[in-house]
Amino acid sequence: MSRDTDSPASVGGEPAAGHRIAVVGAGWAGLSAALRLAEAGRRVALFDAAPTSGGRARTVELATPLGRFEIDNGQHLIVGAYRETLALIERLGAGALLGRAPLSLGSPAGLRMRAARLPAPLHLAWALATARGLGPGARRATLRLMLQLRRANWRGVAGETVTALLARHRQPPALVARLWAPLCIGALNTLPGEACAASFAAVLRDTLGADRRASDFVTPHAPLGRLLPEPAVERLRALGASIRFRTPVRRLEARADPATGRARWRIDDGEFDQAVLAMAPWSAARLLEASDIPPGPIGDFAPEPIATAWALWPANAAPALPRWSLLDEDEGRCRHGQWLFDRGTVSPLETLPLPETLSPLEPGPAPAGARPGPARLAGIVISVASRLDALTPEAVVAGVSAQLAEAFGGPPPAAVKLVTERRATFRCTPDRPRLGADQLRRQAPGLWLAGDWLWPDYPATLEAAVRSGTDTALRILDARTAPGTVV
Ligand SMILES: Cc1cc2nc3c(=O)[nH]c(=O)nc-3n(C[C@H](O)[C@H](O)[C@H](O)COP(=O)(O)OP(=O)(O)OC[C@H]3O[C@@H](n4cnc5c(N)ncnc54)[C@H](O)[C@@H]3O)c2cc1C
């Protein structure tokens, strides 16, 4: 098992008792928690089973006929409402890698909606007043929904689905099909008929219902790893944290410190006063079970896949693409793309120094006869990708290529690579468990949780992960939250 133990904390022997904290999981939640703890002077050891940081939002390497490219494991949509995520990216010095533009939605079928640079709610009023392609009665229906949700303090009826919420607020079918359903599927990775109305309302509250900048689209000019995971690891190392990649934690063992009676946790080859499990709920449930700790409702989350079709053209032979666009999904015709994001021109890795810790999605050389060179890259998002299970990847790719040609014309992509993350998010249904960072305080004192499944009412997002990680760290740092006692 290879280890990255180049930081002072990991070579300097056992640190002082009472201050050692393990964070298991170097995704955006674990990194946020570890940073907050290390910045407060705690001695932190960060473990991840993967060879690199970022978890479900990381940089990977993709082999294509045009060369090997650094790419995201999945195209991510970031909006201005991600305040804590954006603030952290800024604090880590990567803010210059982000572009920002006011909300603008368009689709090949003729949807056009663009917010003005006016104070809220005028920016949205303008967007609705000038919108095209939403169908009859859409403006009044949208305003009605937003006003009534605001009046209800953005709370839905318990157990309500998005479909039921939209029906209760008399949203016309065309508006549902062209706007609300794609937004629900994109934001919650769950079909409207099953998706949680309270989470959808929370998304609307923090984007369309908030200040103008909250609904901005934030577009990265670099792969995801550069925004937060890589600079966070660099900063943690500078703060003396021990960072161990390729280190799956298979079991947690508690023992009572004879001097204090407090719980200490044995993880890998170290002992810790507190530990944060910053991983997806299904990973946490598995680890707890292996440690003879009943996971309870942590085991009740169901995963849902997201697929990204990465389309590449030689840079000098690409069609004119919008910076982003809704695509008109048509399952019956095998047109599964829901969003397109133009990632601009990218250079193959052959002309760049190879990053040390990139995890290859498709190892091996590019096919013979390929001519590596700068390429135009677009990410086509397919949420609720469990619907693709009955199809071959070839059929999905052929459908996406046809969808691009119908929507934007021009030459077909030279390559389309389908990357499916089977456990991308939890299914955001009304009956999913609602848990807190201290869920384990009774049966496993000193063991904390962090992750995108722990921020109240939010779907699985980067922002939920960052907020949860920071919140868990602050709870640990709170002097009133004394470490527990083994019972
Ligand atoms: C394809 C795709 C598209 C997405 N699109 C969007 C989007 O558009 N907008 C958005 O906001 N969000 C999106 N998301 C969701 C977002 O990526 C996640 O919500 C977020 O990354 C979760 O972060 P996390 O830190 O909570 O968990 P994770 O990223 O899952 O991090 C957990 C880490 O723990 C490690 N780990 C697990 N078990 C162990 C163990 N036993 N020992 C050691 N290490 C362990 C894992 O290797 C992992 O690195 C998308 C996700 C995917 C996959």
Image: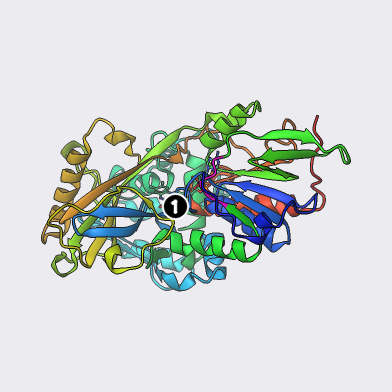
Q: Is residue 245 magenta?
A: yes
Residue 283 on image: x %, y %: 53, 36
Q: Is residue 17 left or right of residue 436?
A: right
Residue 338 on image: x %, y %: 28, 49
Q: Is residue 333 above or below residue 41?
A: above
Q: In terms of depth relative to the viewer, which is nearer, 270 or 430?
A: 270
* Helix, strand or loop: magenta stretch: loop
Q: Quadrant of residue 311?
A: bottom left
In this rendering, does residue 212 appear at all?
yes
The magenta region covers 244-248
Tag 1, which secondary structure? loop
Q: What residue sits 59% from the left and 37% below the top? A: 434
Q: Is residue 458 left or right of residue 362?
A: right
Label 1: which residue? 57
In this rendering, does residue 81 appear at all?
no
Q: Is mark 1 within 8 Å of ligand 1?
A: yes
Q: Is residue 355 left or right of residue 394?
A: right
Q: What residue sits 43% from the left and 70% below the top? A: 97
Q: What residue sits 81% from the left and 29% below the top? A: 487
Q: What residue sits 45% from the left and 48% below the top? A: 56
